[in-house]
Image: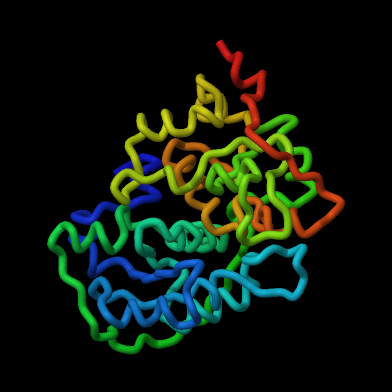
Amino acid sequence: MTRSPRQRHLVQVDELADQLSSVRLLDVRWRLSDAPGDGGRRYAEGHLPGARFLDLEEVLTSHTDDPLDGRHPLPEPTTLADGLGALGVQADDDLVVYDEPGSFAAERAWWVLRWAGLQARVLDGGIDGWVGAGRPLETREPPTAAATRLDLTVGQLPTIDVDAAATFAADGVLVDARAGERYRGEVEPLDPRPGHIPGAVNVSAATLYDDGRMPTDDRLRALLAPALGPDLGPVDDPTTPVAAYCGSGVSAARDVLALAVLGVDAALFPGSWSAWSNDPRRPAALGAQPFTPTLDSRP
């Protein structure tokens, strides 16, 4: 059976309930405000049957001492392979990741796993959707799986670096996934400078929810129209390049996932604003960015 883009990237609660014996579930609950171990403690208090906990900070990102790398650089392939292998993940597994709606960790996990050449889907609605549908949680950990040795080939999804981000809006659409007030430079609670990359347009990842679930395709098109233009040029014209960034490369994966659901392969700028704003040579734009004329005027 041929899957639609939505079906390739998302799984619904009832569908997952029928597939529990054939998928490998990864609980990736994480919040920016978490202390080390908080996600694992929430996992221990209740998780989907058979799920194992995967730590975003330890496995799905790396931590360098260079601020120009940003707050959540992509993981080293060996770190990722070791972390997944310790959970018994195999290269041909059908992986399903979930979190708590609003955390964006599942989207980061989905992106990193696919970037490494693995098959992964996001549970639409996360753990709240599962519980809301009357499905059970469990507190016991599944039996210890035999560790596996993974040989990952990263780079299976597109990325851009800081130099490409600087010129990306000249010929494509650069999407800033942060909250509007951070994009406009009205507040900046985390990074050295307020504002956004010149030429970027704002589609806050937090708006791309519908009661914790991915909105319908029509609703997504309406939500993305302010950034992509009224005719949604990049959606209907695959020659228009699209890239996304956020504060540190986590929540932007939500925008990349939303675009993937519509069939658009958007690149990710992993360093995001946390890398850009730490480089004083890079300019910061303030206020709102108008539509790019070439997209706004498409017939």
Q: Quadrant of the N terminus?
A: top left
Give the quarter of the image for residue 45. bottom left
Furthest residue toward top: 299
As displayed, is residue 231 above or below residue 156? above
Left or right for 264, reference 134: right
Q: Position of residue 100 (x, y in %)?
A: 35, 63
Place of residue 69 in the rendered image (x, y in percent of width and height, measured from the top left): 73, 64
Q: Residue at the right extreme?
A: 281
**Is residue 241 visible to the viewer in this orientation of the structure?**
no
- The quadrant of the rendering that contains the C terminus is top right
Q: Position of residue 137 (x, y in %)?
A: 20, 73
Q: Is residue 114 above or below residue 48?
A: above
Residue 285 in the image, given as x and y percentages of width and height: 73, 40
At 51% from the left edge and 79% from the top edge, which residue is drawn?
83
**Which residue appears at 66% of the width and 19% of the height?**
294
Q: Give me the residue at 46% from left, 67% from top.
A: 31
Indicate left or right for 157 with 128 as reference. right
Q: Say whether residue 141 is left or right of residue 270.
A: left
Confirm whether residue 230 shows in the render. Answer: yes
Q: Say which of 226 and 260 sits in front.
A: 226
Q: Image point 61% across, 35% down: which residue?
A: 201
Residue, far left: 134
The vertical placement of 218 against 33, above or below, is above
Front residue (pair 180, 129): 180
Position of residue 173 relative to residue 12, above or below, is above
Count the marks: how many? 0
Q: Looking at the image, what colour scheme do you see?
A: rainbow
Front in this rendered view, residue 218 or 67: 67
User: Looking at the rendering, which quadrant does residue 296 occupy?
Assistant: top right
